[in-house]
Image (cartoon, grey):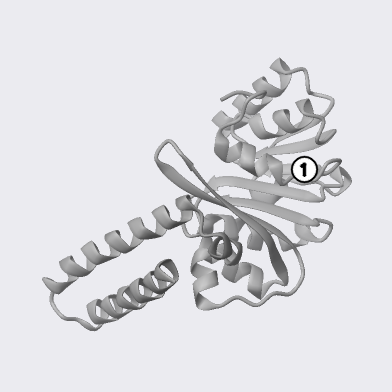
């Protein structure tokens, strides 16, 4: 992967960036995504934010190597604090973190979202936390994608301001993904069910405490929910 050729995961994230957007990529690492977006003419201006000095230095180096200092601003900052009022950011990308961490980043500086029209979020795990956050904060999930790369499966969620309703299954598995039921989607949830059943077997051997009983009921509920979707 480099600034001209992204991984399948990041290329899918990039595909949801509107042409002409001003993007802030939070947790940008080597700034591959902002560099790619500028090289492809999708955006003219971007911010790359990093909270750790090592990746921050890598991003600075990459932007300089690509000759994009006039187009991409690299900042060492915690989450959305990388965004300045004068930047005019209208699109935020956050990729490669857990769903709960992405939510905590969004919740820590809500004022930074006031001028933002679109969020493109790629959680490595627990996308359901993002869907719950969206429901609670008047963001609508307008699209979703699911991709497999290097034996790992990733979900990408695209949010814009608006109202929506989601069922329990849609919070867990994704409304748009449920509608499509791609091969990758079915593979992910078949694997999840297998994992949950293994956990259930181990719980059967554990002492029957209130916590164990509650966990067992939760797993059985999720298994039934997913199997109903997969088999329908």
Q: Is residue 104 or residue 99 the one in the foreground?
A: 99
State which quadrant residue 134 falls in.
bottom right
Q: Is residue 136 or residue 176 the one in the foreground?
A: 176
Q: Quadrant of the N terminus?
A: top right
Residue 18 against residue 70 in the figure, above or below: below
Residue 65 against residue 144 in the figure, above or below: above
Picture coordinates of residue 172, whole percent (x, y)? 49, 68
At label 1, counting other C-alpha atoms closer than 10 Å, the crowd grade (few under 14, some 14-19, many 20 or more) is many
Q: Is residue 182 or residue 123 the one in the foreground?
A: 182
Q: Which residue reaches farthest bottom?
A: 210
Q: Is residue 132 left or right of residue 125?
A: right
State which quadrant residue 159 falls in.
bottom right
Q: Quadrant of the C terminus?
A: bottom left
Picture coordinates of residue 195, whole percent (x, y)? 28, 59
For the point 65% across and 77% down, which residue is it?
A: 165
For the point 77% across and 32% down, which residue is it?
A: 73
Q: Is residue 59 left or right of residue 52?
A: right
Picture coordinates of residue 139, whole percent (x, y)? 71, 67
Q: Which residue reaches farthest front?
A: 232
Q: Is residue 53 left or right of residue 193?
A: right
For the point 67% across and 23% down, which residue is it?
A: 4
SS assignment at label 1: strand
Label 1 belongs to which residue?
A: 23
Residue 56 appears in the picture as rendered:
yes
Picture coordinates of residue 225, whole percent (x, y)? 40, 75
């Amino acid at each position: 992967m480099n600034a001209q050729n992204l991984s399948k995961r990041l290329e899918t994230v990039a595909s949801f960036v509107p042409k002409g957007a001003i993007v802030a990529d939070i947790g940008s690492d080597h700034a591959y995504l902002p560099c790619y977006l500028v090289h492809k003419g999708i955006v003219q201006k971007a911010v790359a934010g990093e909270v750790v000095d090592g990746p921050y230095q890598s991003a600075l180096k990459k932007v300089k190597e690509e000759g994009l200092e006039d187009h991409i601003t690299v900042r060492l900052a915690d989450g959305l604090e990388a965004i300045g009022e004068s930047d005019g950011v209208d699109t935020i990308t956050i990729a490669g973190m857990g769903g709960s961490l992405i939510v905590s980043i969004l919740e820590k500086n809500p004022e930074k979202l006031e001028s933002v029209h679109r969020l493109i979020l790629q959680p490595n795990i627990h996308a359901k936390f993002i869907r719950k956050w969206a429901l609670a904060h008047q963001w609508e999930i307008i699209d979703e994608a699911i991709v497999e790369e290097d034996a790992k499966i990733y979900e990408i969620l695209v949010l814009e301001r608006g109202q929506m309703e989601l069922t329990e299954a849609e919070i867990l598995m994704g409304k748009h993904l449920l509608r499509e039921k791609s091969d990758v989607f079915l593979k992910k949830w078949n694997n999840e069910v297998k994992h949950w059943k293994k956990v259930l077997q181990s719980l059967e051997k554990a002492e029957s405490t209130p916590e164990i009983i509650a966990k067992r009921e939760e797993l059985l509920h999720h298994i039934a929910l997913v199997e109903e979707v997969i088999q329908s």
